[in-house]
Image (cartoon, rainbow, N blue to C red):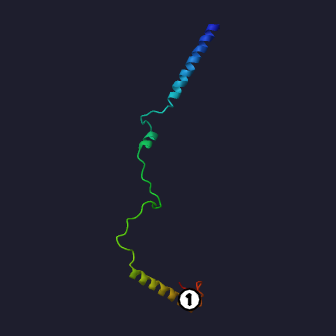
Amino acid sequence: MGFAYVHRRITALAVGAPLLLGLSLGGCATSTAPSSLMDARAEAPMPAKTGAYLPVEDLPAPRQQAALTADERAKLKQELVAARDRQEAAAKAQGVVSAESGKP
């Protein structure tokens, strides 16, 4: 083998290798057209997230009327005090000492 033959072979290899490498890596390049399932999923709209917790920033609309009037609050307080007194009396009858000794 002569020098010219080896020189041609090295030149062909030097030109052919980058050409084949460029063509093979060109297949890995991304395209702008949606051609795969992954591209289709990326372009699809995301479903609304449904969480277990209510969103904090969503406040309810203001009420049209008060939750309890002053008379209703007084009546409810009297009923709660009467229920507490009945429970204390029942506990004393059974001989159980209450943890709270003072009333508000």
Which picture quadrant has residue 31? top left
**Amino acid type, residue under disc 1 in the picture:** Ala
Residue drawn at point x = 63 percent, y = 11 percent: 6
Residue 29 pos. (x, y %): 49, 31
Determine the secondary structure under disc 1.
helix
Residue at image position (53%, 90%) is: 89
- Judged left or right of residue 20, residue 55 is left
> Is 44 located above or below residue 6 in the figure?
below
Instruction: Say which quarter of the image contains residue 69.
Output: bottom left
Residue under label 1: 91
Q: Nearer the viewer, residue 24 or 102?
A: 102
Q: Nearer the viewer, residue 18 or 75?
A: 75
Q: Is residue 27 left or right of residue 59?
A: right
Q: Give the residue drawn at x 53%, y 26%.
A: 24
Q: Is residue 1 left or right of residue 50?
A: right
* In the image, residue 19 above or below residue 85: above
Q: How many numbered circles are shown?
A: 1
> Horizontal and vertical percent for residue 77?
45, 83
Label 1 neighbour load within 10 Å: few <14, some 14-19, many 20+? few
Query: In the image, is residue 90 above or below residue 28?
Result: below
Residue at the far front in the pictured view: 70
- Residue at the far left: name it: 64
Quadrant hosting residue 93? bottom right
The quadrant the N terminus occupies is top right
Residue located at (56% from left, 17% from top)? 15
Question: Residue 46: image x %, image y %?
Answer: 43, 48
Q: Nearer the viewer, residue 6 or 104?
A: 104
In the depicted structure, whether residue 94 falls above or below residue 13 = below
Q: Residue furthest bottom?
A: 93
